[in-house]
Image (cartoon, coloured by chain):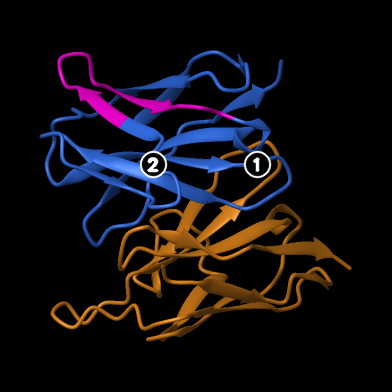
Chain colours: A blue, B orange
């Protein structure tokens, strides 16, 4: 059974960088053809796809966030990470990590972690 | 970006009755080479991550009760719960995974009448 777990600070100051890590268990993060990505959900609102990375490091980002987002992968640790720079209150959300594939939906999700942007 | 719209925003259905949710995409999500719709339905309960229910528009995930069914193709899709149970109270989202960025519908809240 594939499991994903997000970790990172729950509070980030405005203008600073949000950093989260997702640890994968039950499957190798190097297993093709899957991609690993991030999705967020502001409190009480809908879902926004942030971006994704392959085991080889190929990335795809949402154009609405592309200038501020970096997703990286560490196959030796079965982890991938999200960095979002210059955050504002509008970046306050539950951040989920999830698995996806080419022509394949987001089938496994982490439990999510709430990140609040506030001074 | 492909825009996903859902209707209704919310609905209340009596236990054992049928619930129907519609989703429309701003362009076709039918992949020409595979003939599969790159479209999925998710269920989200409070405090939980979304759970994949149906993919390729009509393929139910293993373990999902058969009262959940998906239909449609191209740009118009439907999720039907044939006999609503108490545990089906949730918000339901549609998603296209035809092109990046993947986009979701705004969600439909299902409650018990």
Query: Label 1 vs label 2: CA separation?
Result: 20 Å
Taking A44 as reference, is A10 above or below it? above
Please tell me which residue lies in front, A38 or B22. Answer: A38
Give the magenta part as a residue range. Answer: A71-87
Residue B101 magenta-drawn?
no
What x and y, as percent, mark residue A22?
38, 23
Is residue A39 left or right of B101 when viewed as pictured?
A: right
The disc at residue B68 is: none
Is residue A45 left or right of B30 when viewed as pictured?
A: right
Where does label 2 land, which residue?
A108
Q: Chain of mark 1?
A: A
* Whether residue B10 is visible: yes
Is residue A97 left or right of B50 when viewed as pictured?
A: left
* Whether residue B81 is visible: no
**Residue B111 lies in quadrant:** bottom right
The disc at residue A42 is: 1
- The quadrant of the image that shows the C terminus of chain B is bottom right
Q: Residue furthest right?
A: B113
Q: Residue at x 55, y 13 (%)?
A: A9
**Residue A70 lies in quadrant:** top left
Q: How would you rate the neighbour count of disc 2 (Cα within 10 Å): few for under 14, some for 14-19, many for 20 or more?
A: some
What x and y, as percent, mark residue B99?
30, 65
Mark 1: which secondary structure? loop
Please tell me which residue lies in front, A39 or B55. Answer: A39
């Amino acid at each position: 059974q594939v499991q994903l777990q997000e970790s990172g600070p729950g509070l980030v100051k405005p203008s600073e960088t949000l950093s989260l890590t997702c640890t994968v268990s039950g499957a190798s993060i190097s297993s093709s053809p899957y991609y690993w990505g991030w999705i967020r959900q502001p409190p009480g609102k809908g879902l926004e796809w942030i971006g994704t990375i392959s085991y080889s490091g190929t990335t795809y980002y949402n154009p609405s966030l592309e200038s501020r987002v970096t997703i990286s992968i560490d196959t030796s640790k079965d982890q991938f990470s999200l960095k979002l720079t210059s955050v504002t209150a509008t970046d306050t959300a539950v951040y989920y990590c999830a698995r996806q594939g080419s022509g394949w939906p987001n089938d496994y999700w982490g439990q999510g972690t709430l990140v609040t942007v506030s001074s | 970006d492909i825009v996903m719209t859902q209707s209704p925003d919310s609905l209340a259905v009596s236990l054992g009755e049928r619930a129907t949710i519609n989703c429309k995409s701003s362009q076709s999500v039918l992949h020409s080479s595979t003939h599969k719709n790159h479209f999925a339905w998710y269920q989200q309960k409070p405090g939980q991550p979304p759970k994949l229910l149906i993919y390729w528009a009509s393929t139910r995930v293993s373990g999902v009760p058969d009262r959940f069914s998906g239909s449609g193709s191209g740009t118009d899709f439907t999720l039907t719960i044939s006999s609503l149970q108490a545990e089906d109270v949730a918000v339901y989202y549609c998603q296209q995974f035809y092109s990046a960025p993947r986009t979701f519908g705004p969600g439909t809240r299902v409650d018990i009448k």
